[in-house]
Image: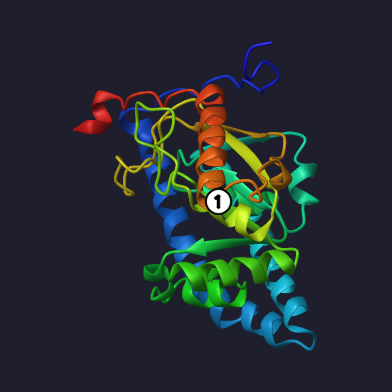
């Protein structure tokens, strides 16, 4: 059986030009506005109430994570309604029922983390420091117990605490969105290092897209002219026990695990198609 034989292969959407693209452009810009204002307003209203409602610290964080999960499900619906993206997922129970695992994924679009959190009610993320200074996002990040990307020792300690609380940790090994025309960017060893040092299993998620849209090479104010079909595929978990460090160093085992993960994605993912000429002008 060849890779992706059981994968949903949706019919491509038409490419919009001229006047037909105007509603798509308006809808795309509105999605950015709603996401930004929604993050700010929820940080000032709903999330503080959930965060400080009576209960243990973990119960409060879990409530916020569930709220973010529901909000992101709504945002994915909005993205679908405006025609920016259409998400196809099946057999996602492995994500919705997961507890305390590392979920990794390739990174073809701007909204990959939104899609993943919409499928995982108890998700955490490692977030770059710049976003913690963003007034639209800071409240959401702190309330949901997300992890700031700081020094290696502090980061590892934060990850251990999050995983021990049965939160699933989302990591993109590519580090940034996939370059158009390639399958994946080279994987960093961060996810493998965290998995081995915290003794945590990794669940690989493959995000398959049929057209290049919401990529790093496209400006945010140019929504894709063709709806992006995104198929979510959940792979078999990588058991951390397979990478026993008693016979070798953590660093060596992390290199081995990273290589195997990168090989898996190289085999499963199709290269992002080149951007149409009209989008490059």
Q: Which residue lies under the disc numbered 1?
A: 249
Residue 119 coordinates in the image, percent (x, y): 69, 49
Residue 164 coordinates in the image, percent (x, y): 73, 67
Q: Is residue 84 above or below residue 62?
A: above
Q: Residue furthest left?
A: 281
Residue 216 coordinates in the image, percent (x, y): 34, 43
Colour basis: rainbow
Name the foreground residue: 158 vs 208: 158
SS label for mark 1: loop
Q: Residues within 10 Å of mark 1 (few under 14, many from 20)?
A: few
Residue at the image point whose x is 58% and y is 71% from the top: 158
Residue 269 coordinates in the image, percent (x, y): 52, 26
Q: Is residue 115 found left or right of 32 in the rendered image?
A: right
Name the foreground residue: 155 vs 178: 155
Q: Quadrant of the C terminus?
A: top left
Q: Residue furthest top?
A: 1
Q: Quadrant of the N terminus?
A: top right
Q: Quadrant of residue 183?
A: top left
Q: Quadrant of residue 265?
A: top right
Label count reads: 1
Residue at the image point whose x is 55% and y is 72% from the top: 140
Asked if residue 149 can be seen in this view, the reply is: no
Q: Is residue 112 found left or right of 77 in the rendered image?
A: left
Name the foreground residue: 130 vs 267: 267
Q: Is residue 77 above or below residue 44?
A: above
Residue at the image point whose x is 33% and y is 24% from the top: 274
Asked if residue 115 can be seen in this view, the reply is: yes
Q: Is residue 222 above or below residue 141?
A: above
Residue at the image point whose x is 46% and y is 22% from the top: 14
Name the foreground residue: 51 vs 195: 195
């Amino acid at each position: 059986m060849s890779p992706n034989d059981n994968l949903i292969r949706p019919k491509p959407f038409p490419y919009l030009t001229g006047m037909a693209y105007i509603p798509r452009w308006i809808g795309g810009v509105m999605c950015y506005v709603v996401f930004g204002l929604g993050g700010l307003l929820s940080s000032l209203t709903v999330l503080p109430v959930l965060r400080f409602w009576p209960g243990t610290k973990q119960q409060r964080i879990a409530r916020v994570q569930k709220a973010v999960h529901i909000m992101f499900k709504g945002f994915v619906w909005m993205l679908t309604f405006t025609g920016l993206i259409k998400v196809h997922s099946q057999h996602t129970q492995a994500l919705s029922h997961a507890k305390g695992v590392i979920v990794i994924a390739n990174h073809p679009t701007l909204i990959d983390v939104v899609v993943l959190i919409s499928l995982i009610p108890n998700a955490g993320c490692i977030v770059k420091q710049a976003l913690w200074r963003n007034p639209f996002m800071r409240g959401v990040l702190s309330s949901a117990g997300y992890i700031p990307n700081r020094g290696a020792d502090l980061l590892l300690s934060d990850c251990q605490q999050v995983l021990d609380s049965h939160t699933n940790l989302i990591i993109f090994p590519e580090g940034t969105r996939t370059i158009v025309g390639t399958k994946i960017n080279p994987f960093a060893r961060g996810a493998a290092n965290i998995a081995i040092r915290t003794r945590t299993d990794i669940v690989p998620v493959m995000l398959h897209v049929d057209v290049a849209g919401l990529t790093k090479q496209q400006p945010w104010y140019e929504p894709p002219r063709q709806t992006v079909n995104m198929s979510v595929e959940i792979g078999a978990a990588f058991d951390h026990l397979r990478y026993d460090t008693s016979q070798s160093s953590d660093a060596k085992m992390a290199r081995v695990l990273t290589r195997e993960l990168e090989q898996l994605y190289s085999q499963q993912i199709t290269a992002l198609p080149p951007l149409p000429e009209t989008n490059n002008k």
